[in-house]
Amino acid sequence: MVPLVILPVEREFLALIEEAETLPVLLRSLAGQGKPDMMDGDDLPEATLRRLEAWAVPEYRGALRLIRHADVAFAAEVLVRALVEFYAQVAWIHEGPTGDSRSQATRAACLELGIASEANEALTKKLSGWGTADPRVHEAAIQRLTDIQAIHAATGCRCSGQKWQVQPILKQADAGGIQWPYGLWVISSAAAHQLLPGRVEVDLGDGTSDFLSIAHYAWRAALLEYVMRAFGLAGVRILDMINPAHAETLRVWIERFVTDQRMVDASHEKFDHVAMEQMNVVRAGLHERAGQPPSG
Ligand SMILES: [Zn+2]
């Protein structure tokens, strides 16, 4: 039996993840600075942003936990898609479609209406043959729709709710020079649709291939950067809407993180090479010990 050894390079990588784990708390504290509490009222767009963020935080944290473990890190790519969708919804409230004259508060109401409408559509049609749901679920969904219809009508907007499809706003950002979200959405969608089995396949060079059982550091670092950018830059847009004085602080923090020398080394395969060297040292140590007479 080979004893389980945590290589120094693995410790270094885990330290990076620990830093990344502080991001949601940082976002909350920046959002709350100079205010009694962050986004705790009913005002739009704060209430909507708070609801979107509350769902995105466990996705972000969940992605980091996956990246922490090399055997399941690949699966984080599916959560990358979820986080890009979060980014897109926030971006839609933040800037809206080109030429849109609605306020951020109104667009938040439009998105809420779209979400509530979709929930009702799903319950009444798509899930109708799925079994008997608790009738209270239906009642709550109808109540939510009625409430949000009133809030939306009060804004003066006549739309029927913002659809949840994120492609238009991502393409708009892409055309405007912010290209990473759309590209990342396309790739992570392919992963979610089971179109990327090649991610874990390696060409052995002799006409055969094999499958990776663990993700390399270079890939784990790339995933770490993706989840950081998607969640973090959505956070920057949230701050820009509710506490703009602190948006730049968060943007700088994210930029510093993704350009950290350890991140650069990990994504350029330096960590993978160092891991091999450290593993060889461990192996040599084990052989040496095995060659010695047992002590005592
Ligand atoms: Zn509307």
Image (cartoon, rainbow, N blue to C red):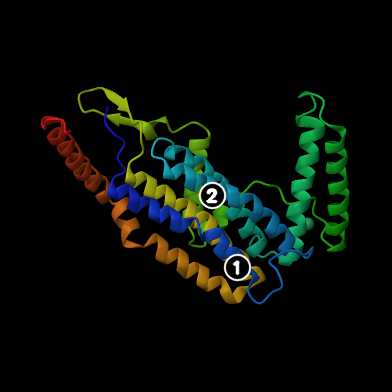
Residue sitting nearer the eye, 147 or 290 = 290
- Residue hosting label 2: 61
Q: Quadrant of residue 246?
A: bottom right
Q: Residue 127: x percent and y percent?
A: 76, 29
Question: Is residue 102 shown to the viewer in this render?
Answer: no
Residue shown at the point (19%, 44%) measured from the top left: 277
Q: Residue 220: x percent and y percent?
A: 38, 45
- Looking at the image, tell me whether mark 2 or mark 1 is earlier in sequence order: 1
For numbered disc 1, what is the local secondary structure?
helix
Residue sitting nearer the eye, 163 or 35 = 35
Question: Is residue 74 shown to the viewer in this render?
Answer: yes
Q: Is residue 103 left or right of residue 277?
A: right
Q: Is residue 191 above or below residue 249?
A: above
Q: Is residue 123 left or right of residue 233?
A: right
Report the amino acid beneath label 2.
Answer: Arg
Residue sitting nearer the eye, 276 or 135 = 276
Name the quadrant where ligand 1 sits. bottom right
- Residue hosting label 1: 29
